[in-house]
Image (cartoon, coloured by chain):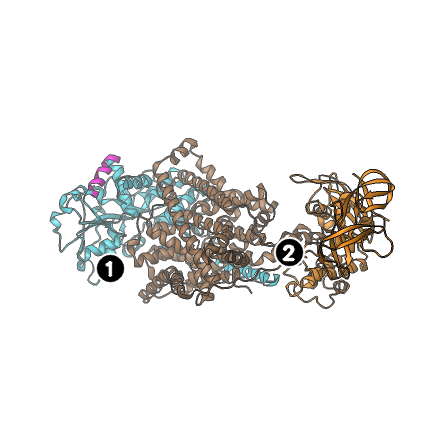
Amino acid sequence: MRARPLSRVLTTALVTALLATTAAGCGDDEDEGLVVYTGRNENLIEPLFERFTEETGIEVTARYATSSALAAQLLEEGSSTPADVFLSQDAGALGALQDAGALVPLAPEELDRVPAQYRSSEGAWVGVTGRARVLVYDSAGVDAATLPTGIDGLLAPEYRGRIGYAPSNASWQAFVTALRVTRGEDGARSWLEGFKANAPQAFDNNVLILDAVDRGELDLGLINHYYVYEKAAATEGGLDALNAEIHRFAPGDAGNLVNVTGVGVLQGKADERTARLVDFLLGEEAQTYFAEVNKEYPLIAGVQPDVPGLPALADLQGPDVDLSQLDTLEQTLALLEEVGLT
Amino acid sequence: MTRALQVRGLRKAYDAPVLAGLDLDVEPGQLVTLLGPSGCGKTTLLRLVAGFDSADGGTVEVAGRLVEGPGAHLPPERRRVAVVPQEGALFPHLSVAANVGFGLPRGQRTGRRTEEVLELVGLAGLGGRMPHELSGGQQQRVAVARALAPGPSLVLLDEPFSALDAGLRAQVRAEVRASLHAAGASAVLVTHDQQEALSVADVVAVVREGRVVQAAAPWEVYSAPADLGVATFVGEAVVLRGEAVGKAVDTPLGRLAVGAVLHGAVDVVVRPEQLDVDPRDGLPTVAAVVADRVFYGHDALLRLRLPDGTEVTARTPGSAFPPPGSSVRLGCRGDVVAFAG
Amino acid sequence: MLPAVATALLALAPLVYLVVRALEDGVGTAAGLLWRERTAWLLVRSLLLATAVTAACLVLGVALAWLTTRTRLPGRRAWVVVAALPLAVPTYVAAFAWLSFLPGLAGSRGVGAFVVLTTCCYPYVLLPVAAALRRADPAGEEVARSLGLTAWQAFRRVTLPQLRPALAAGGLLVALYVLSDFGAVSIMRFDAFTRVIYNSYSSAFDRTPAAVLGLLLVAVTLVLVWLEGRSRGRAGYSRVGQGGPRTAALVPLGRTAVPALALVGGVTAVSLGVPAAALVYWTARGASTSLDAGELLPAALTSLGVAALGALVTTLLAVPVGVLAARRGGRLPRLLERASYLGHALPGIVVALAVVFLSLRVVPALYQELPVLVLAYVVLFLPLAVGAVHASAAQSPPALEEVARSAGSSPAAVLRRVTLPLAAPGIGAGAVLVFLTVMKELPATLVLRPLGYDTLATRLWTETGVADYAAAAPYAALLVLLSAVPAWVLTTRTGERS
């Protein structure tokens, strides 16, 4: 080992590094473009941004990470943030930014396009799409008419060992949080204890639950609605060909929780361009895209996506929960651990 | 002419005092050996002179320049003091020539000077080798060449021959001594080997408990040691109790001549080579019995018991080698050294 | 000294952020968060996991190192390289791979997390131990054998103690890795300490609990680093004597060759085979989905580029700290070295947010630019390089540096002309280790990458985000393959030099 090979290695490394990084970094100076922080998946949202640019001529550069990491980052960045718009995967992150005063109130005409339930009461953010909790059942083995009208019905002895759930899934945890918010800690604990006593089957994720129900191996499953529509889209014959079917609880039941993807504009960034992006996301094209690609619920009345069986906005009757309040996951996890449902 | 090295009152303590006010002079072109037992402070002295450590007190001047003193500590690279560590410590990643040229200004590192110094230590033409391709003796000579190359004011050698085997040691020692003299270098060589100290040095400085107790030409240190400790340390010695009367002393070996005038009880130092077994020339003798003998080839050591029970050691030619139990006559040649006890 | 202090201050930067955030809501709130039962419970779980993984890695690392350096294991030279390759597998890829074959591994008992972390981390022990075994003078073992000890006894009583620094350093890296890892524990659904930190961002959107818990992790790190220092012992480990040590004679395995081969083969098959099989399976299953080479190549180049830059800068900054710690004992150098470990135990997201916080206050113009991203890598991975520099600088005898000083070289010149060239192989190995780790890094890259930057890791994350393993597989495969090259360099560098 002489000195020369090392210095050669170092030089090569440095040159490679500079070449590679400058190659990747060109086209980086987009002063005119919008910077969007988003927790949505790049593969799914990028085509929509491209459509927006085509339509408006406004470039969009996005930073992709989890909604929570981005919310924390935005809070750290404060007024120095390069971001103009935050498109979050869930309402809690937007609620946190709203509380910190990081978001500008949106124009009333945009807010009014979405039902009050799915937007900030202070007008700081507005929902773009909805995701609902549902009960799926084995239509061959279970009579739909006998299914309960609320989650409390699931605690009945007849369902013992027949319900599947995904304990590590964030939506399941959000449902438990909603339960805590609506019923208080003791109410939530008593439901969870009853649920546990009924020996539910734990699954790794929602897809596995749906597959088990569809094959008739499992009678009931607590999952998110869009898994069913995605499976239908991938199945010949569509929704009708599936054995698994969706059951909705009575209006207002905690089992119908609807969480949203929402958008907010950062403080000091409100201008025509940000307004146009918000307008675009709430527009018919974007709403249809979200519904058709992601199978999520449009939150604008009158949008007619080509997703067979997807219910209308008015039929989504979730519990009366302020979505900004679903921000106490740590207590939820502690409660789940206490009850022993992990 | 300014001295190559002048050390005055040098003090250094780590956990315990190591140097306790040491003085030392090295004249230009002189090779001084520091001789002392392990732990006497000689390596510490080298480190302070080289600038690897700083002193607690006292001064060090190299070629008339204060390099170490109260409030002064010149870093090693500015002292023009070259070192040759115990095991040579050649840079394993550099060739012999690059090792030798290490201390030269950038432009001269590959120039003639390197070849010149290699020639001086008798290794001309080996500049392209790597250190591990050389023998131990060669490595040591490269280390010396490396030290000499920049023309330092002073060269410090720290037990440079201890890692070599005995056969090689004498030869390398002579070669290094010749190289140092040929380069006109002033040098300090640390050793605990008496023979090495006496054979290479212009001046031997005996160090004990952090002080130089005697600094003089090798023969002077040997024949006229400053005290009993020096006498016994610099060479084999028979120490006898005696009673001095003027320039003579009464000992179990009879009345012996001393160089100085003394009176009363003394310790007498007799070198084994002064004792002559069965002399033929009328030297006064006493009776003795051979107790033991060790044969070295060129000579032999006899352990002899005198009538009063005292044991002495005599060096004899390999040809005179009486077996244990033999009765012999024992005489003592030349002046002996005595110290008031 | 000054550059070392600067580097250490850089490493301590996240601490400033954590303290600021933790005390934002007052000391009472912070203390309240610390005293919750769940915090303690999760800390204990994390420590148990770290202990189990570290112990398993020490056993596997030593066994494999010994078999591949000291015995006549069939195919020994190939095993040296293969055994270290799991270093190239990111824990999140390994975790996905295991789950696709054995879904039952996930869960709160931690078997899955243990398996994934152990199979991904044991090279952290294997590499330094193998290097130490090659360095260790076999004379000691020979003397022990001549005094009547069996080969095993000699290994245990003579060789193993010599391996203590390597074991301590490797074990520390494994333990810190386990404490800071989020990928494996979240995918394997093991409720560990890092999950609370992530949850407090992802649910409460409250940075105070995350910061308080981060500080707790820093405290745990300090204890671990202190323990490592103690277990290193006080003895000097640089070899006394001239020249290089002899190479040890290789132990013939005889009939034990079969179980030995089974062990080495089994460990590597499990560590490399499972991820490889899963990647092949996913790729094959998704053969219909067309692979977008137009995205793969730039992502690969960016990965290589940022990893090279990260490795270079981290190593350069690690040099003063490592050299100082190796050359000058004493309180300050030791303190500086230990400071460099703090960032390593913190989850990537915490370090990333700290860098966001600080860079916006100090160098706002560079925020979300390459230099700040590289800075985050430095904070996260400094100890990997510092350890390597320290170990290799400690090996070169101080006498060489003194000679160089006397020959007229200033301390800086000595560093450049003697210390660094001698330590170069070890420092290079450290740089490669950082390179590998940066390739795999995800959370800090997501937060701090310049807009529009995509690395293999971020692309992989995007693809798995839509549960599209088939589309993700090529990214994962390329990530593992590209990392395998440096991992291979690492083993040949630290090892089989003539």
Mark 1 — residue? Answer: A233
Using the image, name the chain to which the residue with label 1 belongs. A
- Residue range in magenta is A185-196
Of marks 2 and 1, the one in the foreground: 2
Chain the render paints brown: C
Three-letter residue code for mark 1: Ala
SS label for mark 2: helix
Residue C241, relative to residue A258: is it above or below?
below
Residue at the (38%, 34%) spot, across then down:
C35
Look at label 2 and name its amino acid: Val
Colour chosen for chain B: orange
Which of these two is toward me, C322 or A20? Answer: C322
Q: Position of residue C94 (x, y in %)?
A: 37, 57
Q: Is residue B292 above or below residue C478?
A: above
Q: Secondary structure at mark 1?
A: helix
Q: In screen coordinates, is C246 left or right of B313?
A: left
CA distance separating discs 2 and 1 = 68 Å
Asked if the stretch drawn in magenta spans residue A189, the answer is yes
